[in-house]
Image (cartoon, rainbow, N blue to C red):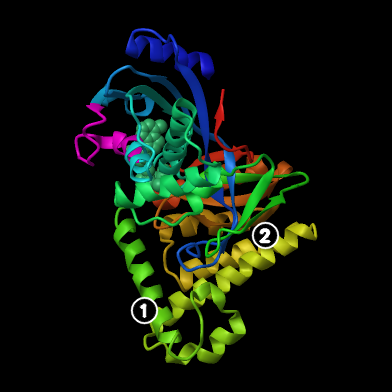
């Protein structure tokens, strides 16, 4: 890949003298969904697929960006004097947002750059290609300008840029999982405190398989904001009777005791998911520590049911992928991953069942939904790196 991207960089920008190649992973969340903005735990891991980049510092203010995933857009040019989000900037709003965010944090980027990207994760599918681009950009800027920031800071700067520059109200999970990624480990992260712990994933004779529904998110973004505000209201109602800062502070028992204070059935279901999913995530990590992969899988399945019935963020496409997966012998667990409404599912599948899984789930999906799903057998990889 390094040779290909350097070669393309030279074709696009004249030559590749002084250019360096980089990589930042994508991520998948194994369990703990829609808990990150509710002060709960998440359990994501970085992948060996992600975003490759080649970058070169310039002597002027110019920013020249090119993506092999958006070839039809050609080179998109702007400058350091123009760090304002715009429609014309298209995908370059992501790297520009990070340059802007560094400036906001007192680390001014003083010269321009040529940047080429080539991602091998699907865009807009819940594997966080946007966070991958942000962390990659941050990593390159640190390398170029020697900014004194840790990988954790790169995650926070990436999130800040996505929230404030790109106006996407995401939590910290995606950027954190990518910036802090560690081969063969998932990250058990408390989103309320940013305390985290690496948990080795030793799946003996099994792999992580991602199924991408190819359903575009559509209404997803507005529903995402709706869920966030439903949870905020439910939290405010609960705070009248119990001293908590977030829904993540409640265990199931305390929730059951006080839930009647939540005035709507819908909000009660949403809060129930946030509370139970957080506890499930804590238990899932325990299960892994005890080498109980079977229990881990059962908790993944329960997570999907809760996202389907209580949080209502799945839809026919994700439900079909998961329900068909559950029918396959050798599937340890399967659930939707990411924000929902479209995007991907994550499954743990025994090695000998992977071919059957892809064939059987793929066939049933196509018959029911009318178009094909894509499958990725993935490995857990490291965070951002220079190639
Ligand atoms: P997700 O993060 O789930 O993949 P998003 O909608 O948040 O989905 O982010 C996708 C957007 O990120 C793309 O539309 C594009 O603007 C940007 N992006 C991601 N990967 C690349 C890439 N390789 N090249 C250019 N832009 C990219
Ligand atoms: Mg994203």
Mark 2, secondary structure of its residue: helix
Q: Position of residue 14 (x, y in %)?
A: 34, 8
Counting residues from the start of the chain, the first of labels 1 and 2 encountered is 1
Write the residue at 36% across / 74% down.
230
Mark 1, secondary structure of its residue: helix
Which numbered tag is attached to residue 303?
none
Does the magenta-highlighted stretch encompass residue 5?
Answer: no
Kindly identify which residue carries mark 2. 297
Write the residue at 29% across / 38% down.
93
Q: Position of residue 53 (x, y in %)?
A: 45, 25
Write the residue at 61% across / 39% down.
378
Which numbered tag is attached to residue 233?
1
Say whether residue 377 is visible.
Answer: yes
Left/right placement of residue 31 relative to residue 330 reads left
Q: Position of residue 253 (x, y in %)?
A: 61, 85
Q: Which residues are magenta?
A: 78-97
Left/right placement of residue 102 relative to residue 61 reads right
Q: Nearer the viewer, mark 1 or mark 2?
A: 1
Q: Is residue 168 above or below residue 32?
A: above
Say whether residue 214 is visible.
Answer: no
Looking at the picture, tell me which residue is in the foreground, 284 or 185.
Answer: 185
Q: Position of residue 149 (x, y in %)?
A: 51, 40
Residue at the farthest right position = 290
Left/right placement of residue 28 relative to residue 169 reads right
Q: Count numbered badges in the picture.
A: 2
Image quarter hosting the C terminus: top right
Write the residue at 32% across / 25% down.
65
Give the distance between the C-alpha atoms of the residues marked 1 and 2, in whole angstroms: 32 Å
- When asked about the image quadrant of residue 383, the answer is top right
- When asked about the image quadrant of residue 83, the answer is top left
């Amino acid at each position: 890949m390094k040779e290909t991207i350097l070669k393309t960089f030279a074709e696009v920008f004249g030559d590749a003298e002084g250019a360096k190649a980089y990589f930042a992973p994508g991520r998948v969340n194994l369990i703990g969904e829609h808990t990150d903005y509710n002060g709960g735990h998440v359990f994501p891991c970085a992948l060996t697929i992600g975003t490759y980049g080649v970058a070169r510092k310039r002597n002027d203010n110019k920013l020249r960006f090119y993506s092999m995933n958006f070839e039809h857009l050609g080179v998109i040019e702007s400058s350091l004097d123009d760090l304002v989000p715009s429609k014309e900037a298209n995908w370059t709003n992501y790297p520009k947002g990070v340059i802007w965010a560094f400036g906001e944090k007192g680390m001014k980027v003083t010269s321009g750059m040529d940047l080429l990207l080539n991602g091998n994760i699907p865009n807009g599918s819940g594997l966080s290609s946007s966070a991958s681009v942000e962390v990659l950009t941050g990593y390159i800027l640190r390398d170029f300008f020697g900014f004194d920031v840790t990988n954790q800071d790169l995650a926070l700067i990436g999130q800040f840029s996505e929230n404030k520059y790109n106006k996407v109200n995401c939590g910290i999970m995606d950027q954190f999982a990518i910036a802090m990624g560690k081969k063969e480990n998932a990250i058990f992260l408390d989103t309320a405190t940013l305390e985290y712990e690496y948990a080795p994933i030793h799946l003996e004779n099994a792999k992580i398989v991602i199924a991408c529904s190819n359903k575009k998110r559509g209404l997803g973004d507005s529903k995402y904001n709706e869920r966030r505000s439903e949870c905020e209201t439910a939290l405010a109602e609960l705070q009248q009777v119990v001293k908590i800062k977030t829904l993540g502070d409640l265990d199931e028992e305390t929730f059951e005791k006080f839930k009647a204070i939540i005035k709507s059935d819908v909000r009660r279901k949403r809060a129930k998911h946030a509370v139970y999913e957080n506890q499930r995530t804590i238990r899932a990590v325990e299960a892994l520590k005890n080498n109980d992969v079977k229990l881990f899988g059962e908790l993944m399945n329960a997570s999907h049911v809760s996202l389907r019935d209580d949080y209502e963020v799945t839809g026919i496409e994700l439900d079909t992928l998961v329900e068909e997966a559950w029918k396959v012998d050798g599937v340890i667990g399967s659930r939707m991953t990411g924000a929902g409404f479209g995007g991907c599912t994550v499954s743990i599948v025994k090695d000998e069942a992977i071919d059957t899984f892809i064939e059987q789930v793929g066939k049933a999906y196509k018959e029911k939904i009318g178009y094909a799903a894509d499958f990725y057998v993935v490995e857990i990889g490291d965070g951002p790196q220079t190639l």
